[in-house]
Image (spheres, rainbow, N blue to C red):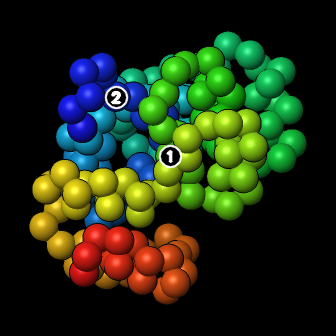
Amino acid sequence: MPSGKPTLVITDASCLIVLDTIDHLNLLPRLFDVVITTPEIANEYGKTLPEWLKLIAVKDRLKQQEFASMVDAGEASAIALAGEVESDYIVIDDLQGRKLASKLGLKVIGTLGILLKAKQAGLVPLLKPVLELIKQTDFRVTATLIDAILKEAGE
């Protein structure tokens, strides 16, 4: 993603978990210069973090607690951190988390959006086989969304 300035993304646990499950976690550092998550999300992920994944704790714990009354703890921490760190995207798949982040003016992308960017950047030759792998996981995604992503990818 050449733009002159480094690209930075904050990611929630679902993106890390599903990309790791289908062996595509390495797409994140290939698409973005800096990939950040929070300690809460690292706990949800439950595995050793890759060396390229930067861990940053939220400073404004009250803001994080406020968000945690609306979305889960990981999403709350990612959204609160996005208010403290200038990022290009925040990766959230949960609908409530996406709504809250969008309402706050954050640029939201989901895991499938990450995969679409990877296809557009030439990092994934075809999305359909990757989406078939995702369907075999417990990641919830509608057929309508898969069809829309494939259409946008030209598949």
Q: x, y (%) of residue 80?
A: 68, 28
Q: Amino acid at mark 2?
A: Thr
Where does the image place residue 86, in percent across and percent down from the top left? Answer: 52, 21
Q: Nearer the viewer, residue 3 or 31?
A: 3
Picture quadrant of residue 78: top right
**Measured from the top left, where is residue 46 in percent x and y?**
47, 45
Residue sitting at x 85%, y 32% = 66
Q: Which residue is mark 2?
A: 7
Q: Nearer the viewer, residue 148 or 29?
A: 148
Q: Secondary structure at mark 2?
A: loop
Q: Quadrant of residue 132?
A: bottom left
Residue type marked 1: Val
In the displayed image of the protein, which residue is found farthest to the top?
59
Label 1 crowd bin: few (<14), some (14–19), many (20+), radius 10 Å: many
Which of the numbered marks, if any, corresponds to residue 25?
none
- Calculate the distance from the C-alpha at mark 2 to the C-alpha at mark 1: 13 Å
- Left-right relation of 98 to 126: right
**What crowding class fits label 2: few (fewer than 14 Cα within 10 Å), some (14-19), or many (20 or more)?**
some
The residue drawn where x is 23% and y is 46% is: 26
